[in-house]
Image (cartoon, rainbow, N blue to C red):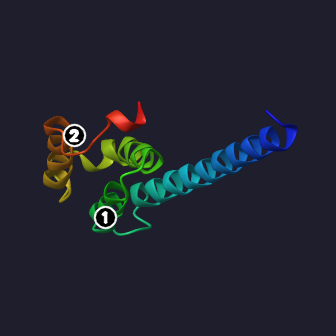
Amino acid sequence: MPVSEHYSMNKNTSITLRYKKKLMGNVRFIGKLLNCKLLASRLLPSIAQMLQEEDTPICLECLITLIDIVGPHFDCHDRGQKAWMDDLFQNFFKGKIDVSSSV
């Protein structure tokens, strides 16, 4: 493999990793804003749906990270988002969300 191709592959990998790191940071930030009630909780389903519809391994990882951050705050009986969270997890278990591509 020529050095230029090797450099190009490493550069693309580096760019992808930086993109993923920034995206994950943004998702964590959004999750913390939702937990602190600085973003309306009604935004959570639409944010999750956008990540789910993108159907890439990076977006699936972001969706899992978002649910991991907001789950303890939203998965309780007194919040309006509990039914939506239950449906999301049912989709995971029924295979409507493909996790095999990210493994």
**Residue sitting at the far top:** 103
Query: Dot 1 surroundings within 10 Å: few (below 14), some, or many (20 or more)?
Result: some
x and y percentages locating residue 85 in the rendered image: 21, 49
**Is 50 drawn above or below residue 92 in the view shown?**
below
* Quarter that holds the N terminus: top right
Q: Given the image, on which type of amino acid does mark 2 rest?
A: Phe
Element at badge 2? helix
Number of the label disc, if any, that sits on residue 95: none
Is 8 in front, or is 16? 8
Quarter of the picture holding the C terminus: top left
Q: Earlier in the sequence, mark 2 or mark 1?
A: 1
Task: Estimate the spatial distance between the alpha carbons at disc 2 and disc 1, rounded to whole Å.
Answer: 21 Å
Going 70% across and 48% down the picture, which residue do you hit?
A: 12
The answer to which quarter of the image holds residue 40 is: bottom left
Residue under pointer 2: 92
Mark 2: give few (<14), some (14-19) or many (20+) Cα within 10 Å: few
**Whole-percent x, y for residue 24 in the image:** 54, 49
Residue lying furthest right: 3
Q: Residue at x 32, y 41 (%)?
A: 72
Residue 69 in picture, x, y percent from top left: 41, 44
Would residue 48 appear left or right of 102 to someone viewing this image? left
* Picture quadrant where residue 26 is located: bottom right
Task: Give the secondary structure at mark 1.
Answer: loop
Left or right of 43 in this view: 77: left
| Occupied quadrant, residue 97 | top left
Mark 2 touching mark 1, by CB under 8 A?
no
Please name the residue shown 86% across and 38% down the image: 3
State the residue at coordinates (43%, 51%).
59
Q: Which residue is mark 1?
A: 41
Instruction: Residue type at mark 1: give it.
Output: Ser
